[in-house]
Image (cartoon, grey):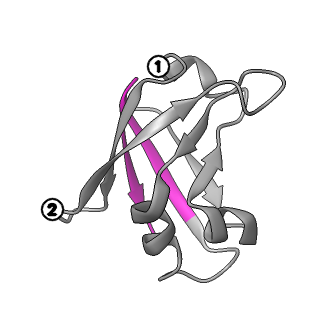
Amino acid sequence: MPNFILILHSTYRKTGFFNISVDFERFFGVDGAPINILIGNTNIQFVGKINRTANKNRTPRIMGGVDLKNWFQTLNIMKQIKVTIINSNSIRLDA
């Protein structure tokens, strides 16, 4: 499964979203599609949304809302998070 490292910047931590680079955008679903966000090897998961209109180049922004924001706030700024793409509508985050 494809994966990449996400650096937890303060904007992501404050807002509960993160952007996908152009190198990995092809692995994600269409604008407005739901995305399952799994947290590590836990039973914690929540549903976010794929937004392809927020960025001018239409690369996905993963909108995780309050649940992702709350999880991000348990981590330090600049933390490296491994993002594993399970399929076009599911990812796993490991901190």
Judged by its main secondary structure, the magenta piece is strand
Q: Give the quarter of the image for residue 35.
A: top left
Q: Give the quarter of the image for residue 85.
A: top left
Residue at 50% x, 21% y is 27
In-image side of 69 versus 80 (left or right): left
Rendered view: 72 above or below 28: below
In-image side of 87 versus 49 (left or right): left
Q: Is residue 84 magenta-colored?
A: yes
Quadrant for the C terminus, please. Answer: bottom left
Rendered view: 91 above or below 69: above
Residue 79, given in percent of the width and then of the height, sits at 62, 74
Q: Which mark is residue 14?
A: none
Q: What residue is shown with label 1? A: 29
In-image side of 78 versus 27 (left or right): right
Which is more N-terminal, label 2 or label 1?
A: 1
The residue stretch that appears in magenta: 81-95
Rendered view: 42 above or below 36: below
Residue at 22% x, 63% y is 44
Of residues 27 and 33, the one drawn nearer to the viewer in this rendering: 33
